[in-house]
Amino acid sequence: MTAGLREACAGSSMHGVGFWLVAAAYAVIMAFSAVPTPLYGLYAARDGFSSLTITVVYAVYAGGVILALFTVGHVSDWYGRRRVLIPALLIAALSSVHLLVWRDLAGLMVARFVEGIAVGATTATATAWIGELHAARRPTATPRRAEIVGVATNLGGIGAGPSSPAGGARPAERSDPPGHGDARSLRHRTFVGVSE
């Protein structure tokens, strides 16, 4: 085997590893973004939130996602995927800190807006990067695999978040609102997994 062929195979292998690391980070960010959903009922009971208030909290999150998709979506095309994904993960960690320490309505709205920014930036960057890594690993293959993995990580992450140990799956078994202790470790595992 020639040196050039060995280098091509090694790069191709690394693209495969990168493909799955980016997909995993994307899935965990999406899961974590959905963790607070079952907690809204607890917050409503504890703080007296109305249905309208909960709807506004969801809208604030959606506004952050939309804003990031329109403004940050193309930044990774210009500056590189890693340069956008790592800060998006840091922004998501910042939203975790907000959820942990600022527990009133204003804190919840700020945290969800910041989380929306992180999710929008991650969605735009990770889906493009998954496609690029797939094409580099399997240049003759169709993009179908990357499309399926991108959709599965997005929807699978959103679906897994509320039922995860960090989510509100079993609120009666906890004294503190669910997700507050486990959120840090979930976010830490996501960040460490992508940055290494």
Image: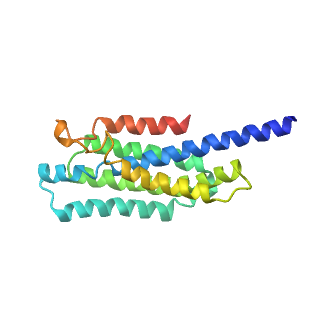
Q: Quadrant of the N terminus?
A: top right
Query: In the picture provided, is 97 more to the left or to the right than 129?
Result: left
Tell me which residue sits at (61%, 59%) in the image: 144
Tell me which residue sits at (46%, 48%) in the image: 27
Query: In the picture provided, is 112 more to the left or to the right than 42?
Result: right
Residue farthest right in this picture? 2
Q: Position of residue 138 (x, y in %)?
A: 70, 50
Tell me which residue sits at (39%, 60%) in the image: 64
* Residue 24, above or below 131: above
Return the residue nearer the eye: 55 or 13: 13
Q: Quadrant of the C terminus?
A: top right
Q: Position of residue 94 (x, y in %)?
A: 38, 44
Return the residue nearer the eye: 98 or 119: 119
**Displayed quadrant of residue 120:** bottom left
Tell me which residue sits at (32%, 36%) in the image: 182
How did the renderer colour the structure? Answer: rainbow
